[in-house]
Image: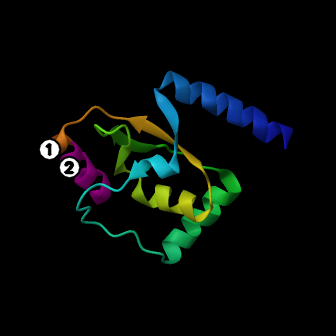
Amino acid sequence: MQERNNMNKEQEREYSERGIITIPLDQIDDFPDHPFQVRMDQDMEKLILSIRMNGLFNPIAVRQKPDGRYETISGHRRRKACTELNMKEIQAVVMDMDDNEAAIAMVDSNLH
């Protein structure tokens, strides 16, 4: 377990350098009118198992809303998986985007 803790500290240092922060999951909202559905299917079960076993490898992308909460731009499935695992926080990159830029980035990330 000690080795995993060291990896977490190294990952935290890298995340900090890349502008990645930890945000409480209950402070993150869905993108309004998100056209792609997050389903509890076999792929989601695999993602949940992977995060349970290995942790979250890639942070989600969010933008901050005027009320101080956050809105998911990319990583809806990762966020859902973390919620299913009863995690309290998630690593995220906070993007500075207007509505149009956020909508384009959200669609683009879901097409990949």
Q: Which mark is residue 16?
A: none
Q: Quadrant of residue 102?
A: top left
Residue at 84 percent across and 44 percent down: it is 1
Residue at 50 percent across and 71 percent down: it is 43
Q: Position of residue 95 (x, y in %)?
A: 33, 34
Q: Which mark is residue 103?
A: 2
Q: Are marks 2 and 1 in contact (CB under 8 Å)?
A: yes
Give the colouring mode of the picture.
rainbow
Q: Position of residue 68 (x, y in %)?
A: 37, 37
Height in image: 32 above or below 39?
A: above
In terms of secondary structure, what is the magenta stretch mainly?
helix
Q: Is residue 112 left or right of residue 42?
A: left
Q: Residue furthest top?
A: 17
Residue 99 sits inside the magenta stretch: no
Give the residue at mark 1.
100
Read off the magenta span: 102-112
Instruction: Identify residue type, mark 2.
Output: Ala
Q: Secondary structure at mark 1?
A: helix
Q: Is residue 69 left or right of residue 45?
A: left
Residue at 23 percent across and 62 percent down: it is 33
The tally of labels here is: 2
Q: CA distance from mark 2 to mark 1?
A: 5 Å
